[in-house]
């Protein structure tokens, strides 16, 4: 049996990390970082750096990419809600409860087969399983 090449193991680990990153919404973090960096560079060309930083992060001056990120996150959440609603209910829920008055409880009939007792003795010697 041959061992798997180390480069293939590393590639698999990298793909797993990227998949987990994307599943957890990491792509939105990367896109938002790119948008903020672009905004900071653009605003700092025409304003002092302190005002550019304030304008970038105050939330009142979103760029086109920021708006697309917000709409993309919103549409992603809507799809998650629709998937949750579309799931089938696979568990049976009882339709009702049967109540019995306490004084009538002892009057309930118990079928005879519930209390059947076997009268025959076990076989002697006990049966053995056949070995295959």
Image (cartoon, grey):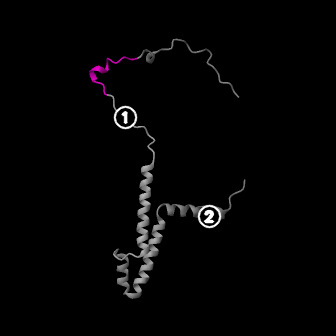
- Say which of 109 and 13 sits in front: 109
Q: Mark 2 or 1 closer to N-term?
A: 2
User: Residue 37 vs residue 4: left or right?
Assistant: left
Q: Position of residue 121 (x, y in %)?
A: 55, 13
| Residue occupied by mark 2 | 11
In the rendered structure, which segment of residues is drawn in magenta? Answer: 99-110
| Residue occupied by mark 1 | 95
Q: Quadrant of residue 75?
A: bottom left
Q: At 40% across and 37% down in the image, what residue appears?
A: 93
Vertical position of residue 103 compared to residue 91: above or below: above
Mark 1, other Cα within 10 Å: few <14 / some 14–19 / many ≥20: few
Q: At 47% across and 71% down in the image, what residue appears?
A: 31
Could you give the CA–CA distance between mark 2 and mark 1, rounded to whole angstroms?
53 Å
- The mark lying in front, picked from 2 and 1, is 1
Q: In which quarter of the image is residue 101?
A: top left
User: Residue 106 vs residue 129: left or right?
Assistant: left
């Amino acid at each position: 049996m041959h061992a798997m090449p180390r480069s293939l193991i590393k590639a698999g680990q990298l793909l797993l990390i990227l998949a987990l990153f994307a599943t957890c919404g990491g792509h939105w973090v990367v896109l938002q970082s790119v948008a903020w960096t672009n905004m900071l560079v653009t605003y700092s060309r025409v304003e002092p750096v302190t005002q550019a930083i304030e304008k970038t992060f105050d939330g009142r001056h979103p760029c086109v990419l920021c708006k697309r990120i917000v709409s993309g996150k919103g549409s992603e959440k809507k799809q998650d809600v629709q998937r949750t609603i579309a799931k089938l209910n696979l568990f049976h829920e009882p339709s009702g409860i049967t109540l019995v008055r306490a004084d009538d409880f002892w009057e309930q009939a118990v079928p005879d087969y519930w209390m059947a007792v076997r009268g025959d003795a076990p076989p002697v010697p006990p049966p053995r399983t056949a070995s295959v």
